[in-house]
Image: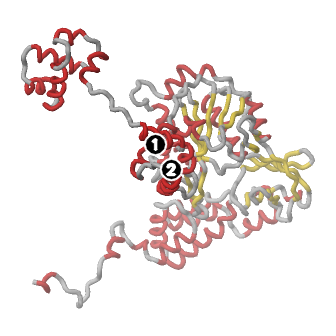
């Protein structure tokens, strides 16, 4: 309307239509149309300037074209079917073309396919309108698992192990927590929730999650049933449990959005890094997470961390004195090899050999395994998730088993002394091999094999092979053997590229042949 009033002012001063179009930056055709309607109105220029915007609009703009009754009835019929069309499109295999063909058969005066798709898209945009929710500070934390997993490599086997990623967010400040887990079982979920509360430095009033089977045993729109372990965790932290409606991700839209941002600010920066343990991976995740929380919001002069500290942290409930730990207790019989087996992942843990044949009690959580006999703890191990493997402490072995290695002179000091006599690279590599297992005696055969290669290939080649192998991350006998067999120890840093060059041969023709 400001342009229309400018046209009135310039017409009153006698400007030409071409000059008015240049002055206000419009093409000549609309200026001519507006000027004609203003001049042909019943008002003079001075009276036109006094009119309100609404009255002036009725003069300048053409009246709306009335829709014929038949066309209006056809649109009303289509709108009455809109809800059905949108619900059917969510079903497998249903397309817009199929719906249009059914609609064309049932309707007396149907729209053509192009108009059908246009109206369907307009109705979909209206039906999928999103609402801006206002969250109170410290009122809720939303949690979810990211759809894509991260991974690390097991040094001993080279196996790539996928890890689910846990994401939590305080929707008021958008302050985020991310952690990679061994698996998505309830003990790991409890471990992640404990770490989340510790990261926030307090406890919000409620926790909202989707209907994941580890947490919700029976989904319900009004009264979902949560697992016993999670209810005990909630009592320990004095927090209320909430669940979203089934298949309604918008009920926890804040964490869904943070999962998308985590792909960009955590997954992407770490995409080329190689990890060898979940703890190493979580350290890298925490570093990127801190950068994410400290980054300013778009078009705002504060970050998630600043808003959390300023408006939300002081309102959180205090943390309990100790973190909640979900513990399991099982009975096991000590086998002849002085180990017991945890059936959850079939890992074997050692106990003192004096308890062979005894029935002991194993109490374990996600991090620690404790073994008791008659209420007295006889062994303590760090929890391992490697199936069918052994965790052994040397002091648990009988004296004869311990002396078996000593009588042969097989001790870490013995192998390191032999390696040092060959060269410093062999010593460094041997030390890495010895540290590759928790139970050092399990590496002695690999060390013997490396020393045997010294007799077969000589000290210089073994020293060169170990120098090359130290640039990698896998330390075992087979790595050195492969380097020596393929003669990679005899290559300089740039020589490996010569392997891909064609050798000289009298049958090869050069550029001179084609002159």
Q: Quadrant of the C terminus?
A: bottom left
Residue nearest the observer in this picture, 53 or 288: 53
Give the x, y percent position of residue 189: 68, 43
Q: Is residue 237 visible in this depiction of the protein? A: yes
Image point (54%, 56%), residue name: 94
* Label 1 secondary element: helix
* Left or right placement of residue 474 versus residue 334 in this view: left
Q: Within 10 Å of the Cα at label 2, are there few (<14), some (14-19), or many (20+) other Cα atoms?
A: few
Image point (72%, 50%), residue name: 383
Image point (53%, 79%), residue name: 456
485 relative to 371, above or below: below
* Left or right placement of residue 101 versus residue 515 in this view: right
Residue nearest the observer in this picture, 183 or 339: 183
Q: Within 10 Å of the Cα at label 1, are there few (<14), some (14-19), or many (20+) other Cα atoms?
A: some
* Residue carrying label 1: 74
Residue nearest the observer in this picture, 229 or 508: 229
Image point (88%, 59%), residue name: 333
Residue nearest the observer in this picture, 64 or 26: 64
Give the x, y percent position of residue 335: 86, 63
* Residue carrying label 2: 107
* Label 2 secondary element: loop
* Left or right placement of residue 266 versus residue 477 in this view: left
Give the x, y percent position of residue 243: 68, 37
501 relative to 396, above or below: below
Q: Quadrant of the N terminus?
A: top left
């Amino acid at each position: 309307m400001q342009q229309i009033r400018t046209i009135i002012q310039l017409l009153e001063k006698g400007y030409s239509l071409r000059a008015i179009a240049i002055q206000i930056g419009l093409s000549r055709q609309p200026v001519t149309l507006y000027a004609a309607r203003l001049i042909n109105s019943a008002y003079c220029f001075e009276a036109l300037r006094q009119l309100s915007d609404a009255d002036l609009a009725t003069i300048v703009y053409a009246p709306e074209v009335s829709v014929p009754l038949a066309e209006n009835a056809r649109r009303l019929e289509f709108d009455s079917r809109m809800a059905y069309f949108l619900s059917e499109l969510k079903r497998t295999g249903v397309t817009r073309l199929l719906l249009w063909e059914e609609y064309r058969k049932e309707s007396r005066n149907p729209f053509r396919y192009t108009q059908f798709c246009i109206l369907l898209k307009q109705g979909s945009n209206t039906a999928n309108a999103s609402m801006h929710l206002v969250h109170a500070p410290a009122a809720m934390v939303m949690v979810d698992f990211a759809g894509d997993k991260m991974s690390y490599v097991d040094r001993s086997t080279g196996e790539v192990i996928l890890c689910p990623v846990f994401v939590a967010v305080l929707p008021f400040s958008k302050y985020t927590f991310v952690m990679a887990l061994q698996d998505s079982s309830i003990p790991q979920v409890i471990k992640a929730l404990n770490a989340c509360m510790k990261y926030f430095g307090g406890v919000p009033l409620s926790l909202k999650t989707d209907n994941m089977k580890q947490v919700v045993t029976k989904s319900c729109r009004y009264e979902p049933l949560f697992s016993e372990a999670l209810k005990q965790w909630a009592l320990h932290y004095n927090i209320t449990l909430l669940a979203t409606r089934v298949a309604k991700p918008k009920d926890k839209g804040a964490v869904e959005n943070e999962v998308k941002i985590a792909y960009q600010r955590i997954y992407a920066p770490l995409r080329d890094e190689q990890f060898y343990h979940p703890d190493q991976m979580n350290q890298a995740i925490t570093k990127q997470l801190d950068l994410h929380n400290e980054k300013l919001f778009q078009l705002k002069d504060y970050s998630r961390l600043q808003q959390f500290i300023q408006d939300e942290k002081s309102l959180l409930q205090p943390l309990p004195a100790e973190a909640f730990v979900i513990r399991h207790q099982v009975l096991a019989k000590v086998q002849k090899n002085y180990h017991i087996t945890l059936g959850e992942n079939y890992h074997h843990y050692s106990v003192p050999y004096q308890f062979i044949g005894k029935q002991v009690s194993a109490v374990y959580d996600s991090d620690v395994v404790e073994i008791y006999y008659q209420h007295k703890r006889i062994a303590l191990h760090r929890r391992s998730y490697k199936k069918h493997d052994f965790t052994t402490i040397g002091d648990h072995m009988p004296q004869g088993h311990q002396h078996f290695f000593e009588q042969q002179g097989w001790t870490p000091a013995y192998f390191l002394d032999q390696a040092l006599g060959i060269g410093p690279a062999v010593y460094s590599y041997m030390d890495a091999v010895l540290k590759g297992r928790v139970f050092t005696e399990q590496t002695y055969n690999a060390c013997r094999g490396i020393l045997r290669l010294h007799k077969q290939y000589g000290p210089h080649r073994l020293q060169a092979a170990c120098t090359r192998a130290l640039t990698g991350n896998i330390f075992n006998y087979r790595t050195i053997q492969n380097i020596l067999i393929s003669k990679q120890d005899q290559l300089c840093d740039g020589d490996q590229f010569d392997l891909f060059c064609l050798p000289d041969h009298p049958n090869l023709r050069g550029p001179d042949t084609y002159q």
